[in-house]
Image: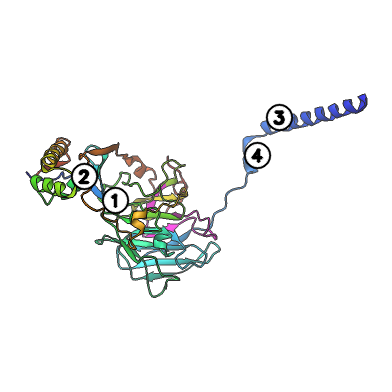
Amino acid sequence: MGLSSVLAHRWRGFCLALGVAALGVAALLTPLPARAQSCTAPAFATRADLSTTGSPIAVAAVDVDRDGSLDLRATTQTAVMSLRRGNGTGGFLRRGDDPRGGLHVLLRGRGLQSGRPAGHRGGERRWTVESSSTEPLRRPPVVASAPMSPRPAKGIRGLRGIVWVNPRVRKGSWPLWERVRGGWPGRENQAYSANASKATSASAPRSRPPRTSWAWAPRTAWCTLCGSPSPRDPLPSWTSGRPGKPFRMVVGRGLAMPERVDPKESTKPDGAPGSPPGRERYEKPAVAWEEVLETRPGLMQGCAKLPGQTGPCESATAS
Amino acid sequence: MSYRYAPRLAWQLIDGEAVVVDLDRSRTLGLNRVASLIWSFLPERDEATIAAEMARRFDVSLETATSDVSEFLRSLRAQGLVVEA
């Protein structure tokens, strides 16, 4: 290689470095608004309102009929459960009601391995797979129902996570959530629970928290991002609440959880715990753990808007 | 002696473990397995009956169970989680 070619190579490298530096300086000198305009705004599906006959208690985005598009499911305190089937392109079909109301919890995902949300009916201590004449099961559930207590849904095979929210926790407090078997509810299994005054969801404790915000609920429950056409990567948000009461909206993205089935429990079809022979091992009764109850009433005041108003509160994030 | 739950409590048995929300003191407590069973018996049984049940279910003598149950209930009472019925 001759001296001239070496000089030429170095000259080209110098010019390249100079060009990159010039671009960097130009980018720094560009006004911020101009740079912001170059970003692509996130696109969301059109918000779908789900009017419910009664006060909505819980809303879940789930592919109820397993046709590949997300549906909206809401429970109310009346004997009507509302459903809007997704059309797969971000929209929803006409609302249909199902006379199975009164569920206090909706379990989204592969609850009970049926592809159908499971619910907990008030007054009963069982998780029951929803069924109705209008939505026949595509395949039979592994178990139609399972006991909720003293061993709640953790013992159900195929159920990865349940969040139980004690409805007696006063309004304004964060809900009580409990640990679930194998971790926290993942993307495919999220339990949503609500009582008459709030709706809650699970979040992964060591992950980025789900974006939450508070807003006002008119006599509807709505879902903002439920129009995701792909059921494999749903990023649903859902809301619920009483008319005129603040409620919590969660855009859920949980952690995937490893499957964990207790061999002792897997031998029983209903997930009931097996009884060890003889007397159980004794431990001195004590408080195993204690945590400060995280009460954040300020969040309830985070969106002081009137019903029907739209604006930043619907998309505001809370820490 | 019989006890009952303090009025401003919310609790739930989860997988055999009692999770208690103490609204007065803004805290959440989890009881171990034996303590949770004792907790679940509280509104229905007195201290002696609970101890007998513990001795029947667990690998522990009645004397030890009686002592432990009594001590545990006293600690709950001191913390304001239970009150005398």
Separation of disc 3 and disc 2 at Cα? 68 Å
- Residue A237 falls inside the magenta stretch: yes
Tell me whether marks 3 and 2 sit on the same chain. Answer: no
Q: Position of residue A234 (x, y in %)?
A: 51, 56
Mark nearer the viewer, 1 or 3: 1
Separation of disc 1 and disc 4 at Cα? 56 Å
Q: Residues within 10 Å of mark 4 (few under 14, many from 20)?
A: few
Separation of disc 1 and disc 3 at Cα? 61 Å
- Which of the numbered marks, if any, corresponds to residue A25? 3
Q: Position of residue A261 (x, y in %)?
A: 39, 54
Give the residue furthest to the front.
A278
CB-based contact (under 8 Å), mark 1 and mark 4: no
User: What's under tag 3, amino acid-wise?
Assistant: Val
Which chain does tag 3 point to?
A: A
Mark nearer the viewer, 2 or 4: 2
Tell me whether marks 2 and 4 sit on the same chain. Answer: no
What span is colored magenta in the figure?
A213-239
Residue under label 1? B15
User: What's under tag 4, amino acid-wise?
Assistant: Ala
Residue B73 lies in quadrant:
top left
Mark nearer the viewer, 1 or 4: 1
Tell me whether marks 1 and 3 sit on the same chain. Answer: no
Q: Position of residue A110 (x, y in %)?
A: 43, 60
- Which of the numbered marks, if any, corresponds to residue B34? 2
Q: Residues within 10 Å of mark 3 (few under 14, many from 20)?
A: few
Of residues B11 and A44, the one nearer the viewer is: B11
User: What's under tag 1, amino acid-wise?
Assistant: Asp
Examine the rendered structure and indicate whether residue A96 appears above or below residue B83. Answer: below
